[in-house]
Image: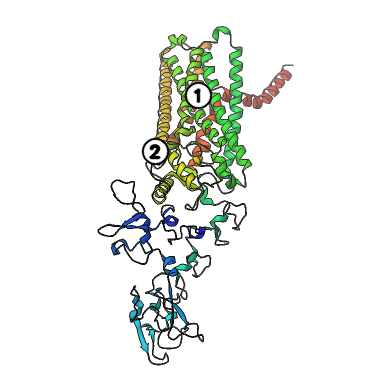
Amino acid sequence: MTISDKQVCDDVIDCPDLSDECLCAKGKTLDICDAICNPYDDTTNCTRKSIRCGLPPKDFEFSRVCNGNEDCDVTSGHVDEKHCVAKQRQDDIIMQCPKGGTAHPLRPQTAAKCDLRPECSDFSDECDNNQPCPHALEYCQYLFTDFGAARGEKRFNCSSGLRENSLVGSGLLGGQVCDGTKNCIGGEDEKFCPHRYECIAGDDIISIDTRELCDGKINCLDKSDELNCSQYFYCENGDPLFVLRSVMHDGSDDCSDKSDECPSNEMESRFASATEMIAHPMFKAMVWIMALLSLIGNLFVISRQIYLLYEMPKRMRNGVSASNHVLILNLAAADLLTATYLSSIAFHSAKFSGVYCQMDKTWRSGNTCINMGFLCSVATETSVVILVIMTSSRLYSVFRPFNTSHVTARKTGLACLCGWLVSLLFMLPPRLERFGDYFANSVWYPNKFHSSDIVTKQELILFVKRLTILSDNISQDTGDGWDFIEEIAKFHNPHNQHKFVKFGYYSKHSVCIPNMLATPQDPAVHFSAFVTLFNLIAIVYVIVAYVMIYRKATKSSKVLKTPKTDKSRSHDARAVAMQRRIFRLVASNVLCWGPLTIMAVLQLTGSTLPPDMYAVTAIILLPINSALNPILYSNLFDVLCVCFTRNIKQPVTSATLSTRDTTAV
């Protein structure tokens, strides 16, 4: 059996297997769908394609749904006949109205017998005591016989009185009751009407036939009869109110604001808008600034460290000084990868500007975005690991100054290599397809039963489970893994032009950052929590270690009582410079990982953070160390300060010297 797209998820059962309504997304299914028996559940002991309802529970085959008999009792709300308007209308029996004619529209010649709405002027089609209808109608109790102008026919009694625009007489004709128009002053003629939809607002048209719901024509003054219809997409600016969902993403702008091609509710990312990959102009500017600072700074540091290592005497190339250069070189290399990620995001943000929504799913599901997210994660974790190695090396040198011969450039290089491998292996699982069951949370799967092309895993699990119950071609429910879900979904929708593409740890957001701020509902929440905890422990270790170094250096300077010499003054100057560097180091890492850790904990405890907070984390907090590390871990800051100071003082010094020479002469 084939039905129209308009009949899918329209709250009316059309398919004999209930699939047009019971495969709809959670929240849109009918109550009868919850009564469907699951033959794969050993605890239910029920048969295939049956519903269980009533007290005590009884099983009924699908064929008894919408057959005109209420098999489910009142305790279950008669769910088997509750959503069968189309069936009831199809089986209508046409009868002749006794007092029918053509002179007046309210006196029709024929009417549908027992269709719950009076049409004959004397109510004989619904309230005939000689041939009663199976459904007792309450409005039949308010009829009286008018022996005046109505020639002895039955009419409806308005206890509150007739409105001025009603037919002249002492009561209402059949066609004036349950017609959606308030003809009695108190509206009692519309209070006892089954299968009517009550409009939310309006004094004249207060209800319509349920067959007129979601039919493409606005009947209620408040337009509520055409709202919440699953077959429509509602234009975000209301011009027009709606278009068919089938015309979405067809390349034609049917809504005046183009929202049918770029709906905002399909933009999962907290960063993007319908037109921009990074919606906020300030954050877009920050990406460019961080990318340029990271690129220039780290390229400068890398080239300088290579130059210093090359110019270093051979006898010193395996000492502590060379080890420090190796550490700074690896740290700059990691930060350069972050700069590459930022540059790629900045470039694609400019490339997709104005049309991002059309590229969103393709971009986030593509290898470029996923690889950039993976690159950012490896670079960030490597930077943290090398920071720990650097701190450990300096801590050892301070507390074991006479054993520094053990700290060699070769050992340091090996430690850095291990750090790179650890970071690579640590962040690789989210990139691998085989771990999709754990990391993937949604999939690109356009279909008629979900309002969005992006469907979450939980929604798909429910969809597939119901599909296995309703379908004759699927004999067994084999689990809730992505492989099984993909197999069943593709079987059900073989003409889907898009691949069954999953969105996971690196493709959740438009800027492709890892899902660091996970919520308890995210599939990879434990992995994200572990990463955050690892980074927190590393930063706390660095802070504590440098505090110990600072105290050790301060204590050593107090013990030294000899008079100041040029050598000691130089030593003190280096100590002060080191203390400043330590302060900048600790401050930058606290400013980076402190707020990030706090926000991660809040997210894990169920708190909701503003969307801009996540943007701050991705665009400022994560890459800030990549931009600042060239300043903090090298003498770039000191070189820039010296150059700046010389440029200011040099003219003054020359003028002073010239004056002195003139005076001497």
Judged from the image, the secondary structure of the residue bearing numbered disc 2 is: helix
CA distance separating discs 1 and 2: 30 Å
- How crowded pointer 1 is (Cα within 10 Å; few <14, some 14-19, many 20+) is rated as some
Q: Quadrant of residue 238?
A: bottom right
Q: Quadrant of residue 639?
A: top right
Q: Amino acid at mark 1?
A: Arg
Examine the rendered structure and indicate whether residue 522 appears above or below residue 94.
above
Q: Nearer the viewer, residue 221 or 139?
A: 139
Q: Which residue occupies the extreme bottom position in the image?
A: 148
Q: Which residue occupies the extreme top position in the image?
A: 315
Quadrant containing the C terminus is top right
Q: Nearer the viewer, residue 387 or 632?
A: 387
Kindly identify the residue that appears in the image at 56 percent across and 28 percent down.
337
- How crowded pointer 2 is (Cα within 10 Å; few <14, some 14-19, many 20+) is rated as some
Examine the rendered structure and indicate whether residue 311 appears above or below residue 380.
above
Q: Is residue 443 left or right of residue 644?
A: left
Dot in front, 1 or 2: 2
Q: Is residue 236 left or right of residue 539?
A: right
Which mark sits nearer the N-terminus, 1 or 2?
A: 1
Residue 460 visible in the displayed image:
yes
Q: Amino acid at mark 2?
A: Val
x, y (%) of residue 610? 46, 46
x, y (%) of residue 525? 40, 37
x, y (%) of residue 438? 42, 36
Reading the image, the residue beneath label 1 is 581
Examine the rendered structure and indicate whether residue 447 appears above or below residue 11.
above
Reading the image, the residue beneath label 2 is 601
x, y (%) of residue 77? 32, 63
Q: Quadrant of residue 426?
A: top left
Judged from the image, the secondary structure of the residue bearing numbered disc 1 is: helix
